[in-house]
Amino acid sequence: MNILVTGATGYIGPFLIKKLKEIGHNVTILVRKKEDFIRLEAQGFKCILGDITDKESLVGIFNNIQILFHLANIASWWLPNNQTYYDVNLKGSINLFEESKKYPLDKIIHVSSIAAIRQPEGIMADEESIHQGDFESHYSKSKYLVEKETEKYLKDGLPIVTLNPGVVTGPKDTKTFGKTVLGIANGKVKAKFFPNSYIPLVYIDDLISIMIKSIDLKVGSKYVVVGENIKIGDVFDKVCKITDRDKITKITPNFILLMVAYYSEFLSFFNKKRPSLPIDGLKAIKIGAQASSKKSINDLDMEYLNGDQILTKLIDWFNKNNLINNCA
Protein backbone atom coordinates (compact mmCIF):
# COMPACT_ATOMS: atom_id res chain seq x y z
CA MET A 1 0.00 0.00 0.00
CA ASN A 2 1.03 3.62 -0.45
CA ILE A 3 1.59 5.04 3.02
CA LEU A 4 2.40 8.56 4.20
CA VAL A 5 4.06 9.01 7.60
CA THR A 6 4.36 12.22 9.60
CA GLY A 7 6.69 12.41 12.58
CA ALA A 8 9.08 9.83 11.14
CA THR A 9 12.13 11.49 12.69
CA GLY A 10 10.96 11.13 16.31
CA TYR A 11 11.54 8.08 18.51
CA ILE A 12 8.70 5.89 17.18
CA GLY A 13 8.86 6.92 13.53
CA PRO A 14 12.13 5.23 12.48
CA PHE A 15 10.94 1.87 13.83
CA LEU A 16 7.63 2.24 11.98
CA ILE A 17 9.00 3.21 8.57
CA LYS A 18 11.60 0.44 8.74
CA LYS A 19 8.90 -2.16 9.45
CA LEU A 20 6.54 -0.81 6.79
CA LYS A 21 9.31 -1.00 4.21
CA GLU A 22 10.30 -4.53 5.30
CA ILE A 23 6.79 -5.87 4.76
CA GLY A 24 6.51 -4.34 1.30
CA HIS A 25 4.66 -1.06 1.63
CA ASN A 26 5.56 2.05 -0.36
CA VAL A 27 6.49 4.61 2.27
CA THR A 28 6.45 8.38 1.80
CA ILE A 29 7.66 10.61 4.61
CA LEU A 30 6.70 14.20 5.34
CA VAL A 31 9.81 15.97 6.66
CA ARG A 32 10.50 19.55 7.76
CA LYS A 33 14.28 19.64 7.45
CA LYS A 34 16.29 19.30 4.27
CA GLU A 35 18.97 17.25 6.03
CA ASP A 36 16.31 14.69 7.06
CA PHE A 37 15.02 14.69 3.48
CA ILE A 38 18.50 13.83 2.15
CA ARG A 39 19.21 11.23 4.86
CA LEU A 40 15.91 9.37 4.48
CA GLU A 41 15.93 9.41 0.69
CA ALA A 42 19.40 7.85 0.87
CA GLN A 43 17.77 5.04 2.87
CA GLY A 44 15.32 4.40 0.04
CA PHE A 45 12.31 6.37 1.25
CA LYS A 46 10.37 8.87 -0.81
CA CYS A 47 10.22 12.21 1.01
CA ILE A 48 8.16 15.38 0.78
CA LEU A 49 9.32 18.65 2.32
CA GLY A 50 6.50 20.10 4.37
CA ASP A 51 5.38 21.26 7.79
CA ILE A 52 2.04 20.42 9.37
CA THR A 53 1.84 23.99 10.72
CA ASP A 54 2.08 25.35 7.15
CA LYS A 55 -1.13 24.64 5.21
CA GLU A 56 0.37 25.57 1.85
CA SER A 57 3.18 23.03 2.22
CA LEU A 58 0.59 20.25 2.66
CA VAL A 59 -1.24 20.82 -0.62
CA GLY A 60 -1.12 17.65 -2.71
CA ILE A 61 0.75 15.48 -0.19
CA PHE A 62 -2.01 12.84 -0.29
CA ASN A 63 -1.81 12.22 -4.03
CA ASN A 64 -1.86 8.43 -4.53
CA ILE A 65 -1.76 7.87 -0.75
CA GLN A 66 -4.00 5.19 0.80
CA ILE A 67 -2.90 5.23 4.46
CA LEU A 68 -1.74 8.06 6.73
CA PHE A 69 0.20 7.40 9.93
CA HIS A 70 0.07 10.65 11.87
CA LEU A 71 2.80 10.70 14.51
CA ALA A 72 4.00 14.30 14.23
CA ASN A 73 3.71 16.19 17.50
CA ILE A 74 5.73 17.90 20.18
CA ALA A 75 6.12 15.52 23.12
CA SER A 76 7.83 17.58 25.78
CA TRP A 77 7.15 18.82 29.29
CA TRP A 78 8.59 22.26 28.57
CA LEU A 79 8.80 24.74 25.72
CA PRO A 80 9.86 28.40 25.72
CA ASN A 81 6.40 29.28 24.40
CA ASN A 82 3.43 27.12 25.48
CA GLN A 83 1.43 28.18 22.44
CA THR A 84 3.71 25.96 20.36
CA TYR A 85 2.00 22.87 21.78
CA TYR A 86 -1.30 24.01 20.30
CA ASP A 87 0.18 25.33 17.06
CA VAL A 88 1.88 22.00 16.31
CA ASN A 89 -0.15 19.30 18.03
CA LEU A 90 -3.62 20.76 17.56
CA LYS A 91 -3.57 23.16 14.60
CA GLY A 92 -1.03 21.01 12.76
CA SER A 93 -3.31 17.98 13.06
CA ILE A 94 -6.30 19.99 11.89
CA ASN A 95 -4.31 21.16 8.85
CA LEU A 96 -3.53 17.54 7.98
CA PHE A 97 -7.12 16.39 8.44
CA GLU A 98 -8.45 19.26 6.33
CA GLU A 99 -6.09 18.45 3.46
CA SER A 100 -6.88 14.73 3.73
CA LYS A 101 -10.60 15.45 3.25
CA LYS A 102 -9.85 16.14 -0.42
CA TYR A 103 -8.66 12.57 -1.01
CA PRO A 104 -10.18 9.06 -0.72
CA LEU A 105 -7.88 7.71 1.98
CA ASP A 106 -8.53 4.20 3.27
CA LYS A 107 -7.30 4.90 6.80
CA ILE A 108 -5.84 7.61 9.01
CA ILE A 109 -4.00 6.13 11.98
CA HIS A 110 -3.66 8.83 14.61
CA VAL A 111 -1.06 8.00 17.24
CA SER A 112 -2.22 9.88 20.31
CA SER A 113 -1.14 9.32 23.92
CA ILE A 114 -2.28 8.11 27.32
CA ALA A 115 -1.86 11.77 28.31
CA ALA A 116 -5.03 12.55 26.32
CA ILE A 117 -7.16 10.20 28.46
CA ARG A 118 -5.29 10.39 31.79
CA GLN A 119 -7.46 9.74 34.84
CA PRO A 120 -7.03 10.96 38.42
CA GLU A 121 -4.42 9.18 40.51
CA GLY A 122 -5.29 5.53 41.11
CA ILE A 123 -7.95 5.24 38.37
CA MET A 124 -7.39 3.02 35.32
CA ALA A 125 -7.96 4.60 31.90
CA ASP A 126 -9.34 2.69 28.93
CA GLU A 127 -10.71 3.39 25.46
CA GLU A 128 -13.91 4.90 26.86
CA SER A 129 -12.10 7.30 29.19
CA ILE A 130 -12.24 11.06 28.88
CA HIS A 131 -9.49 13.08 30.51
CA GLN A 132 -10.53 13.89 34.08
CA GLY A 133 -9.36 16.61 36.42
CA ASP A 134 -6.98 19.46 35.74
CA PHE A 135 -4.54 19.15 32.89
CA GLU A 136 -1.12 18.60 34.41
CA SER A 137 0.60 19.95 31.30
CA HIS A 138 0.05 21.84 28.07
CA TYR A 139 1.18 18.71 26.25
CA SER A 140 -1.61 16.69 27.84
CA LYS A 141 -4.22 19.35 27.10
CA SER A 142 -3.12 19.66 23.48
CA LYS A 143 -3.37 15.89 22.95
CA TYR A 144 -6.84 15.86 24.53
CA LEU A 145 -7.97 18.66 22.21
CA VAL A 146 -6.67 16.78 19.17
CA GLU A 147 -8.77 13.77 20.15
CA LYS A 148 -11.83 15.98 20.41
CA GLU A 149 -11.12 17.10 16.84
CA THR A 150 -10.73 13.52 15.61
CA GLU A 151 -14.21 12.80 16.96
CA LYS A 152 -15.59 15.63 14.81
CA TYR A 153 -13.70 14.49 11.71
CA LEU A 154 -14.91 10.93 12.21
CA LYS A 155 -18.47 12.20 12.07
CA ASP A 156 -17.54 14.06 8.89
CA GLY A 157 -16.42 10.80 7.32
CA LEU A 158 -12.66 10.71 7.80
CA PRO A 159 -11.48 7.08 8.28
CA ILE A 160 -9.67 7.62 11.58
CA VAL A 161 -8.28 4.98 13.94
CA THR A 162 -6.77 6.17 17.25
CA LEU A 163 -4.03 4.55 19.30
CA ASN A 164 -3.19 5.68 22.84
CA PRO A 165 0.27 4.37 23.72
CA GLY A 166 1.76 4.75 27.16
CA VAL A 167 5.42 5.55 27.83
CA VAL A 168 7.26 3.98 24.89
CA THR A 169 10.75 2.58 25.38
CA GLY A 170 13.21 0.22 23.76
CA PRO A 171 16.46 0.37 21.81
CA LYS A 172 17.89 3.88 21.35
CA ASP A 173 15.76 5.34 24.16
CA THR A 174 18.39 7.41 25.94
CA LYS A 175 16.45 10.64 26.39
CA THR A 176 13.17 9.85 28.16
CA PHE A 177 12.35 6.79 30.27
CA GLY A 178 15.58 5.15 29.15
CA LYS A 179 17.59 8.07 30.51
CA THR A 180 16.26 7.36 34.01
CA VAL A 181 17.02 3.65 33.64
CA LEU A 182 20.56 4.48 32.53
CA GLY A 183 20.96 6.81 35.50
CA ILE A 184 19.94 4.05 37.89
CA ALA A 185 22.08 1.43 36.14
CA ASN A 186 25.15 3.66 36.20
CA GLY A 187 24.70 4.72 39.82
CA LYS A 188 24.03 8.34 38.96
CA VAL A 189 20.45 8.34 40.28
CA LYS A 190 20.95 7.59 43.96
CA ALA A 191 17.45 8.12 45.36
CA LYS A 192 13.95 7.10 44.34
CA PHE A 193 11.26 9.64 43.52
CA PHE A 194 7.49 9.21 43.70
CA PRO A 195 7.97 5.43 44.27
CA ASN A 196 4.23 4.70 44.33
CA SER A 197 3.39 6.54 41.11
CA TYR A 198 2.63 4.38 38.07
CA ILE A 199 4.16 4.46 34.60
CA PRO A 200 2.11 2.85 31.79
CA LEU A 201 5.05 1.25 30.00
CA VAL A 202 5.09 -0.29 26.52
CA TYR A 203 7.91 -1.76 24.45
CA ILE A 204 8.49 -0.21 21.03
CA ASP A 205 8.10 -3.53 19.15
CA ASP A 206 4.66 -4.04 20.70
CA LEU A 207 3.57 -0.56 19.65
CA ILE A 208 4.82 -1.13 16.10
CA SER A 209 2.94 -4.44 16.01
CA ILE A 210 -0.41 -2.85 16.81
CA MET A 211 0.32 0.04 14.45
CA ILE A 212 0.74 -2.44 11.60
CA LYS A 213 -2.46 -4.22 12.66
CA SER A 214 -4.27 -0.87 12.67
CA ILE A 215 -4.08 -0.69 8.86
CA ASP A 216 -6.84 -3.30 8.77
CA LEU A 217 -8.86 -2.07 11.73
CA LYS A 218 -12.42 -0.82 11.48
CA VAL A 219 -12.76 2.95 11.06
CA GLY A 220 -13.48 4.55 14.43
CA SER A 221 -11.51 1.93 16.36
CA LYS A 222 -9.53 3.06 19.38
CA TYR A 223 -6.99 1.11 21.40
CA VAL A 224 -4.92 1.72 24.50
CA VAL A 225 -1.39 0.36 24.06
CA VAL A 226 0.30 -0.49 27.37
CA GLY A 227 2.40 -3.48 28.39
CA GLU A 228 2.35 -2.98 32.16
CA ASN A 229 1.49 -0.27 34.64
CA ILE A 230 4.59 -0.34 36.81
CA LYS A 231 5.39 1.63 39.96
CA ILE A 232 8.44 3.90 39.75
CA GLY A 233 9.78 2.29 42.93
CA ASP A 234 9.58 -1.11 41.25
CA VAL A 235 11.48 0.23 38.23
CA PHE A 236 14.34 1.18 40.57
CA ASP A 237 14.29 -2.22 42.27
CA LYS A 238 14.17 -4.19 39.02
CA VAL A 239 16.94 -2.18 37.36
CA CYS A 240 19.17 -2.64 40.41
CA LYS A 241 18.48 -6.38 40.39
CA ILE A 242 19.15 -6.79 36.66
CA THR A 243 22.40 -4.80 36.87
CA ASP A 244 23.56 -6.35 40.16
CA ARG A 245 23.52 -3.06 42.01
CA ASP A 246 22.64 -2.55 45.64
CA LYS A 247 18.97 -1.77 46.14
CA ILE A 248 18.22 1.95 46.41
CA THR A 249 16.26 2.70 49.58
CA LYS A 250 16.66 6.47 49.85
CA ILE A 251 13.64 8.52 48.67
CA THR A 252 13.87 12.15 47.59
CA PRO A 253 11.21 14.16 49.48
CA ASN A 254 8.51 15.66 47.28
CA PHE A 255 9.19 19.19 48.52
CA ILE A 256 12.83 18.93 47.39
CA LEU A 257 11.72 17.89 43.91
CA LEU A 258 9.27 20.78 43.83
CA MET A 259 11.94 23.27 44.89
CA VAL A 260 14.30 22.01 42.19
CA ALA A 261 11.55 22.21 39.56
CA TYR A 262 10.58 25.79 40.40
CA TYR A 263 14.21 26.91 40.59
CA SER A 264 15.11 25.29 37.25
CA GLU A 265 12.10 26.91 35.57
CA PHE A 266 13.04 30.25 37.15
CA LEU A 267 16.46 29.98 35.48
CA SER A 268 14.86 28.94 32.19
CA PHE A 269 12.76 32.11 32.19
CA PHE A 270 15.98 34.05 31.75
CA ASN A 271 18.26 31.75 29.76
CA LYS A 272 15.49 30.19 27.61
CA LYS A 273 17.09 26.76 28.05
CA ARG A 274 15.17 23.61 28.95
CA PRO A 275 14.90 23.29 32.75
CA SER A 276 16.55 20.26 34.34
CA LEU A 277 13.20 19.35 35.92
CA PRO A 278 10.14 20.94 34.25
CA ILE A 279 7.20 21.60 36.58
CA ASP A 280 4.74 20.00 34.14
CA GLY A 281 6.90 16.89 34.01
CA LEU A 282 7.08 16.74 37.79
CA LYS A 283 3.29 17.00 38.07
CA ALA A 284 2.77 14.28 35.46
CA ILE A 285 5.19 11.91 37.20
CA LYS A 286 3.64 12.59 40.61
CA ILE A 287 0.11 11.88 39.38
CA GLY A 288 1.29 8.94 37.33
CA ALA A 289 -1.01 7.10 34.96
CA GLN A 290 -2.56 3.68 34.61
CA ALA A 291 -4.27 2.33 31.53
CA SER A 292 -5.71 -1.02 30.45
CA SER A 293 -4.81 -2.82 27.20
CA LYS A 294 -7.43 -5.50 27.81
CA LYS A 295 -9.36 -4.52 24.68
CA SER A 296 -6.39 -4.93 22.31
CA ILE A 297 -5.43 -8.22 23.99
CA ASN A 298 -8.95 -9.57 23.49
CA ASP A 299 -9.69 -8.09 20.05
CA LEU A 300 -6.28 -8.24 18.37
CA ASP A 301 -4.51 -11.06 20.22
CA MET A 302 -1.83 -8.65 21.34
CA GLU A 303 0.82 -10.14 23.61
CA TYR A 304 2.66 -7.38 25.41
CA LEU A 305 6.01 -7.58 27.15
CA ASN A 306 5.67 -6.97 30.89
CA GLY A 307 7.80 -4.63 32.96
CA ASP A 308 10.50 -7.21 33.74
CA GLN A 309 10.84 -8.17 30.09
CA ILE A 310 10.91 -4.55 28.92
CA LEU A 311 13.59 -3.53 31.40
CA THR A 312 15.70 -6.62 30.66
CA LYS A 313 15.64 -5.95 26.90
CA LEU A 314 16.35 -2.25 27.42
CA ILE A 315 19.32 -2.94 29.68
CA ASP A 316 20.61 -5.60 27.26
CA TRP A 317 20.64 -2.96 24.53
CA PHE A 318 22.43 -0.49 26.79
CA ASN A 319 25.06 -3.12 27.60
CA LYS A 320 25.58 -4.06 23.97
CA ASN A 321 26.16 -0.39 23.19
CA ASN A 322 28.54 0.11 26.13
CA LEU A 323 26.28 2.61 27.88
CA ILE A 324 26.43 0.93 31.31
CA ASN A 325 29.68 1.05 33.25
CA ASN A 326 29.01 -2.24 35.11
CA CYS A 327 30.74 -0.97 38.22
CA ALA A 328 28.40 -1.54 41.15
Image (cartoon, rainbow, N blue to C red):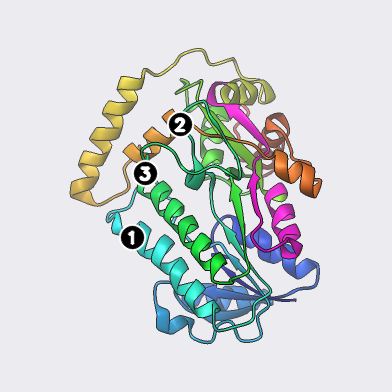
Magenta stretch: give its range: 206-233
Q: Dot 1: what SS?
A: helix
The residue labelled by disc 2 is 120
Asked if residue 75 can be seen in this view, the reply is no
Q: Residues within 10 Å of mark 3 (few under 14, many from 20)?
A: some
Disc 2 and disc 3: Cα gap in Å?
14 Å
Q: Which secondary structure lies at badge 2?
A: loop
Look at the picture and state if 120 lies above or below 92. Answer: above
Q: Residue at x 80, y 72 (%)?
A: 24
Percent of width and height locating residue 128: 58, 44
> Dividing the picture into quarters, in which one does residue 84 lie?
bottom left
Q: Where 258 falls versus 319 (above or below)?
A: above
> Mark 2: which amino acid?
Pro
Relative image position of residue 105 (x, y in whole percent): 64, 77
Q: Is residue 14 visible?
A: yes
- Residue marked by disc 1: 84
Looking at numbered disc 3 in the image, what kind of residue is underneath it?
Answer: Ser
Residue 290 as seen in the image, left or right of residue 50: right
Q: Badge 1: how crowded within 10 Å, few (<14), some, or many (20+)? A: some
Q: Secondary structure under badge 3?
A: loop
Instruction: Find residue 207 and report its horizontal and vertical position in percent.
Output: 68, 50
Measure the alpha-carbon separation of dots 2 and 1.
26 Å
Q: Residue 137, labelled with which disc? A: 3
Q: Nearer the viewer, residue 215 or 311?
A: 215
Quadrant of the image for the N terminus?
bottom right
Of pointers 2 and 3, the one earlier in the residue sequence: 2
Give the mark, 2 or 1, whose residue is nearer the N terminus.
1
23 displayed left or right of 87: right
